[in-house]
Amino acid sequence: MTRLDDILAYADAQLDQSLGRLFELIRIPSVSTEPEYAGDCQRAAEWLAVQLAEIGMDASVRPTQGHPMVVGHGPAVPGPHVLFYGHYDVQPVDPLNLWNTPPFEPSLAPQPDGETYILGRGASDDKGQLLTFIEACRAWKAVTGSLPIRVSMLFEGEEEAGSPSLGPFLEANAEDLKADTILVCDTDMWDRETPAITTMWRGFVSEEFEVTTADRDLHSGMFGSAARNAVQLIGTIIGKLRNDDGSVAIPGFYDGVTELPEANRKEWERLPFDPEKFLGDVGLSIPAGEAGRSVLEQVWARPTAEVHGVWGGYAGDGFKTVIPAKAGAKISFRLVAGQDPERIRKIFRDFVTALIPADCSVTFKSYAAAGAQTMPLDGKLLNKARTALTEEWQRETALAGTGGSIPILGEFKQRLGMDSLLIGFARFDNRIHSPNEKYDLSSFHRGIRSWVRILHAFSE
Amino acid sequence: MTRLDDILAYADAQLDQSLGRLFELIRIPSVSTEPEYAGDCQRAAEWLAVQLAEIGMDASVRPTQGHPMVVGHGPAVPGPHVLFYGHYDVQPVDPLNLWNTPPFEPSLAPQPDGETYILGRGASDDKGQLLTFIEACRAWKAVTGSLPIRVSMLFEGEEEAGSPSLGPFLEANAEDLKADTILVCDTDMWDRETPAITTMWRGFVSEEFEVTTADRDLHSGMFGSAARNAVQLIGTIIGKLRNDDGSVAIPGFYDGVTELPEANRKEWERLPFDPEKFLGDVGLSIPAGEAGRSVLEQVWARPTAEVHGVWGGYAGDGFKTVIPAKAGAKISFRLVAGQDPERIRKIFRDFVTALIPADCSVTFKSYAAAGAQTMPLDGKLLNKARTALTEEWQRETALAGTGGSIPILGEFKQRLGMDSLLIGFARFDNRIHSPNEKYDLSSFHRGIRSWVRILHAFSE
């Protein structure tokens, strides 16, 4: 038996103990956005520091303006140095009445198909996922007495609250935290059996705007036609945002946008992805994005404008013949490499302002922004991880994109110059952020085994 | 002294008694839309029937499915036969805390400029206005022993509730109610000193519609660009409703629309109307209607589309990156002579339906409709009334339009074939339908005098 097989066998044998530790962590209700749980966030941080100490790391709980960070460093050994990032905070549990089991009392629920669900808030996001890495390190330490490469870890307690302390903490601790790459376990598998590394994600920039026409609501019998209607105006602006071909109509929006690299295109072409099923599962059949682009390109590799909400005038029961004086909307842009979020914010505001009649006005409110990132597909660590995952799951690893945005990784890139490897074992039906969150026992078990293999591969 | 002067002098001398009767009527809280006031509506109807009996009319309270009608007939005499229409019901008083005096306890409030406000719900709309006519008849009866022409009256108690019983009642009592013209006292003066006859009003048709894209709200990170966004779709539809030149973009919308008759145009040209002040008073300066049309034409003589409310997606605090699956809007069209409301409803629905992608859907909900009406300016009674008003107010009477709609008069036209003469003494600042409704004492007093003169003119 090779050393790797020993460690995998140890991880298998210790699964119940690993699961016991996950249950301990889930029982700590570390909801970051609700002040009454601040003590629990502190407890979760201290609990993690104990785990890191148990695997031989120099671990500490570090205060911030908000909830604390946990930092751990393993001994320096030759080879690559990785920084594993995770978050110990969880989403609120409302509405509580929709939970079938108490959210902070974890339990196992065997399923008809042989899978077993680990139920509880944070079971997947991110307590279950981050523990796959710690438990893999624990197995290495137990069997070999050490970790095969230099490993550092950073856990924050404010990810579900927008990570306000992360940037300043990285800035203040840049030297302490710098490593060759960041590992993150907070993403999904490609499908139930196919492992995935997420190699590109979109950026975004979000805005709210409100137009004002008259200085009060008017009666359409008295003023109808002659007085500017704020809802008509906001409709006109929204209507002009996208062209008939699905593209965004703001002048300059596509400046700097690069075509999908050929390497990514090749990877995506072989992915088992059915665009008809993707849309069909939500009741749609006609892609609404840029004509001539595949659905995967539309959602992963192309920028877009999406209106998230609109309001104005009378929306209650019955009818009121008012000419509304105010109307507003919330909008965000998903961005790709080559687009500067703050430049997009500016040209959006210019675009809207140009559509406002001289006797009307508009106000804007900034919301968050983050850049897009694309990881090179020829990285040495990425390809070692890919091979290790393929060996564990016996399926070719997907090098996938995501249409979502991961602002914290922009912080790492911007402040520490570090790229990221996103490897996660969650499944699409885990109901993260919703009642009855679960993590599959097979995700947890084979996630631990996957990291055992990845650490091995990195040390070769 | 002529007979007319005697009657005017009597009306002047009896003003306090007339005011006392108005106070009696205001004290009856005849709110038609709130079931707990049903008994008060009945009481108001009975009170009116007593007034009509006092001036020698054959008066009766007539039950309907809702609140009762009051019908009165004066003796048949040679000359024209008029049917005076009014409504004894009033709007609800919410929000009560904004009233400076109790809404159903009428009072007088002298103003610095010498005017006196009659305060109370219904003081203007329509109790004060309808009593100007009854009190004028009372003066005629008191001084001469009879009315100078044949007068009938009809009062309803559901005008503020959409007049559901009026059409059936007219239908069932067509023979009893038929007269040469309808007189209505429910409109404004042109300005504080200038009397007005309203000779044209717009029709309308109102619709609510809701679009559905996906079968649930989606996350813009996962689906952004490829999945149809319901708020984007409703914005696109609203944006396409009006052309850049302010006209309505629905194909066929202007079919049958006639140009303003030359007689009306001439009347309007001499009206003291300042379009800059009209818009400036509500904080606007640029007419939003059809380019090349005057503001008066835009609001009185041209049809329009107005969106009264829009909804969809997340409109609360903060930000949610949702792709909304549903969005809706309420819209109405103001129409002019030559436009059939139901045809406009149909072409609007066709217009919207053509913009719905094949994998999305739209539902429509019908709200009320009414045709536009234009009274000929060369009618004998209209010109007699005009002269009488000019004599009373010593200002040229305005023959005005209104951009609003008066559905009940469509009922009279459609069911009884009768045209209407709209003569009212309300002022623009009467706060009808709002807290602190008032009627000017001069409106009440000179309104009574005006009707005394009009009855005289009709009898000549």
Image (cartoon, coloured by chain):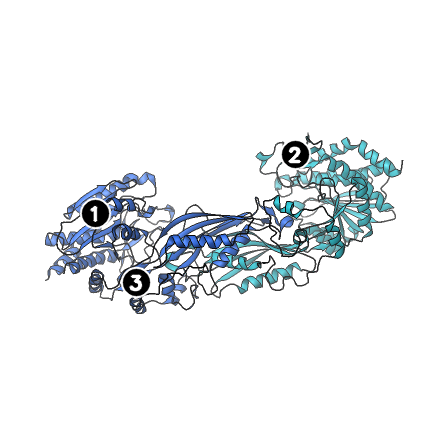
Chain colours: A cyan, B blue
SS of the residue at dot 3?
strand
Sort mark 1 into few (<14), some (14-19) or many (20+) by Cα contacts within 10 Å: few
Query: Which amino acid type is shown beneath numbered disc 3?
Result: Ala
Numbered circle sitting on residue A155: none
Q: Is residue B22 left or right of residue A323?
A: left
Q: Quick check: can you spot residue B125?
A: no
The residue marked by circle 3 belongs to what chain? B
- In x, y percent, where is residue A80? 84, 49
Q: Are marks 3 and 2 on the same chain?
A: no
Give the mark toward the camera: 1 or 2.
Answer: 1
Q: Residues within 10 Å of mark 3 (few under 14, many from 20)?
A: many
Q: Is residue B299 above or below residue B120?
A: below
Q: Is residue B292 visible?
A: yes
Q: Please indicate whether residue B342 sits to the left or right of residue B53 in the image.
A: right
Mark 1 chain: B
Badge 2 element: loop
Judging by the rendered image, the residue that carries numbered circle 2 is A104
* Alpha carbons under labels 1 and 3: distance apart: 31 Å
User: Mark 1 highlights which residue?
Assistant: B175
Above or below, A392 relative to A239:
above
**A330, above or below A193, in the image:** below
Q: Mark 3 highlights which residue? A: B400
